[in-house]
Structure formats: structure tokens, C-alpha cells
Image (cartoon, helix red, strand yellow):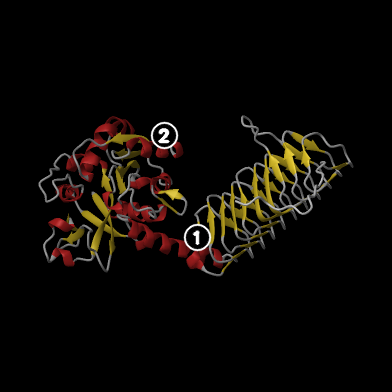
Amino acid sequence: MALDAAILLAAGGGTRMKTRIPKPLFTLAGKPFIIRIMSAVDHLHPRIMSVVTRYGKEQVEAVALRAFPDAVMVHQDAHPGTGRAVQCALASLEERINQLDPEQNGSILIAATDMPLLNTATLMTLLEAHDHSDDVATVLTTHLDNPYGYGRIVRAADQSVACIVEEKDATDAQRQITEVNTSVYVFKTSVLKAAIRNLNSHNAQNEFYLTDAMEFARQYGHVGACAAPDSLAVEGVNDRIQLMNLAKAYNRRICEYWMREGVTIWDPESTWIDDEVRLGHDVELLPNTFLRGRTVIGEGSLIGPDVELDTMIVGQNAHIHRALMQQSTVGACAEVGPFSYMRPGCDLGAWAKQGTYVEMKKSTIGDNTKVPHLSYIGDCTIGDHSNIGGGTITANYDGVHKNKTIIGSNVHVGVDNMFVAPVEIADGVTTGAGAVIRHYVHRGSLAYSENTQHEVHNWHPKAQ
């Protein structure tokens, strides 16, 4: 059966999160909730993918459309409830659906966006169960030891779904039910269109419940339930405690996956790895390591302790410890740290070194070049086999523009040097301690600055 549309519910304010950030924009393992759900649904190839928004509409739509520009955005009006969200979506999509499926034989998937681990495999299980059973509607369920706060699945004598009762509307007996609604449904298109018209807000919350549409659907045929094969995939996030617990459980799975792939992780509790990180064989991760974004680490590299890498490319057998590094590249066998900061746009060559208390920004450091300690290298290119003395500063900002410093290969820079950009130093240059370099230095030269030392004998400071 074709999937006519997927309707993703992203209109809620997430009041229990106590935030001004729309809940769909909270992140887990490096991705916003809304993008995680949209990616999972996109692999099902729905004819239309729509997102219903209200709270933080502009922010949510901007993020969603940046990743999925063909998605259809639908605004929910002031009437509350998931049922009202679907009513708004169907009103907006009806003409398109009628054109794509004139016979109305397809299906429509509905999913909330506060289940960040909902994946394609779980959704496919639901769709297949729906198709094979010929249900007019099917709800994805799971069993919880503590179902408090969730809608309960009430079964009929034939084990079909009689209704879904929300926590506040449930009887004491219904609250004992452990099978709960995950807020993921698939309806036959014609049935959803008919059932959604009958919704009202006569309940404790004065909301239009989408769950009532499941009860109305019984008039048209069998209403089924499909248990999610992985309870973690359908775990919702209603507050920050649930987010923390879900993030920990998922991160543990990620760490275990990489350990099975040949990565040593000494402390999974303090090692955090985003979804799109890629690790080579025999990578070793020490405690307090955070790998974010699309970071790629080559075979045999040692990372940590106390390292945060964000969208980094790290070559084989590199060693990075006690460092913060962003959107840059580190060559094979390079060494970084401790207490180093690499800002975006850097390229550290093979066997190169960024040492203790060194900050780099938009700079290219050649192979076997060392910047050992206490230096700032910004908007700079340094060749191969050079050594930069401690306390070196590239003065790249003139108050208006960021200017470039070029240092050649086989250069030996003395301690406490300052390069006033724009400036270029040719290959084979040596600079003296305390030099201030303002002009071009020719190949093979020695450059130093006059700084005569004076001494005043028997000097005493004036009394304060």
C-alpha cells in the first residue's frame, strides 16, 4: 500500500521542558529531534511529508526546510490537541492527496516529533503490520513498567484496539494497563479523512484528541496495534530528565557499537559520540572525550583525556589530549595538547605539533612543523620542518581587517616573537628572541630586533 502522506506533529510548546526553545529543536546525538524524525520518515518515501507547527513556527520551519526543502509546512490554529493538528494538515493537503491518490487506497502515517530515536526500521514494522493485517488503522504501542502519563491501549474481546484513553481521562482500572500509545499511527487515507471530521474537545483537557479518531475508525473496519520491537525507539521526551536518561541509554549503544568495531573506549559513561562520527580500527578513546558532528578519526589514533572534537578530520596515529578543536584537519601522527584550542579552518600537517596553551585559527601548519607552547597562530601559513618558539604571536588584526602571515619551511623562530601581518618570511630564516617582524625577510636570513638592555645601578623605587 502506498504511503500518501506523513504528518509530523511539531506544534507543541514543550512546557515541561521549561524553555523558550521549541521542543522539536532540542538535540540528541548531534541532531535536532525534528531532523531525526524527518530523516527516518524520508526513507519510507512518502508522497508528501508535512510538518504541523505552531509554537516557535518560524524556527522549526527554518530548520526543517533547510534539511528537507520539499516538505510541506502546515500551521495549526489556536484550537489545541493532536487531533486538531491532523485536521489542519488534512485540510491543507487534501487537494494534493486527491491528485496523487484519487481512489484513496493509500495510507497516511502520523507521528509525534518528541521521540528522537524513532527510526525507519520501527516505522517499517508498523507499516508492514498495517498492510498485512488489512487494518483500517494501526497504532504503534509499547509496554512500560511505569506507564504514568501515557495513553493506555484498551483492547476489545477480539484483541483489536477498542480505544485509547489518556491518563487524565482513565479509570483506576485502565491506569493499570501497561500497553501504551506511542503517538505513532497509520490510517487508511479514506478512513482518516472520515474519522477526523468527528473529533470534538469533550474531555478533561478540552483538546481535540487524535486518539479519538482511532475509536471512530472502528466503524470502518479492524483497528490494530503493533508493538515496537525496540522500546527505546519510541521513548518520548517530555522533560529534561527524560532527555538525559534517553541520551545516556542511546550513547551507551553508540559506544558499544564502536567497541564491537574495534575501538577501545575506557569509560563509556564519560565518552559521548554523535551519530555521524566515524572511527577507524584501534582508535583509543580516553575518559571525558566528546566527539561531535561529522568527526572522522583515523586508525590507531589516541584521543583524550579531556578532548572535544567538533566536525574534525583526524589522520592515522594522531595523539590529541586535553584540547578543544573545531572544523579543522589534523594529519597522520600529529600531536595536539595539552590545553590547546584549534578554531575552525585549520590544517595541521603530518607529524606536526600544536603544543601546550597554543591557539590556532584559520591556519595551515606544514608537515613536521612544531608550535610547542604559549602561542597564538591566526590567519597564518607555515611551511614544513619549521619550529615556532614559545610566546609567538601573529598579530593578524589591524583594527579593520584580518591579515595574513606567511612563514616558510625550515624556519626557526625564536621565543617571544611577534609577526605583524601582513608579512612574509621566506624559507630557511632564523629569527632572534623577542623579534618584532614587520617586513619581508629574505631566504636564509637572520632577523632580529634591536632592544638594547639598560641597567640602572643602586636604583630604589619611590615610596608609595
Residue 78 placement (x, y as % from top left): 20, 37
Earlier along the polypeptide chain: callout 2 or callout 1? 2
Residue 162 placement (x, y as % from top left): 16, 57
Q: Quick one: 357 or 163, which is closer to the camera?
A: 357
Q: Residue furthest front?
A: 463
* Relative side of 106 to 297, left or right: left
* Relative side of 35 to 369, left or right: left
Residue ID at (82%, 41%): 450
For numbered disc 1, what is the local secondary structure?
Answer: strand
For numbered disc 2, what is the local secondary structure?
Answer: loop
Q: Quick one: 107 or 409, which is closer to the camera?
A: 409
Q: Which corner quadrant holds the N terminus?
A: top left
Q: Which residue is mark 2?
A: 70
Residue type at mark 1?
Answer: Trp
Quick one: label 1, few (<14), some, or many (20+) residues within 10 Å? Answer: many
* Cα separation between marks 2 and 1: 33 Å
Q: Which disc number belongs to residue 272?
A: 1
Residue ID at (20%, 53%): 222
**Quarter of the figure with residue 167:** bottom left
Residue type at mark 2?
Answer: Asp
Q: Say above or below: 201 vs 269.
A: above
Residue ID at (42%, 45%): 35
Residue 90 placement (x, y as % from top left): 25, 36
Residue 158 placement (x, y as % from top left): 17, 62
**Quarter of the figure with residue 338:** bottom right
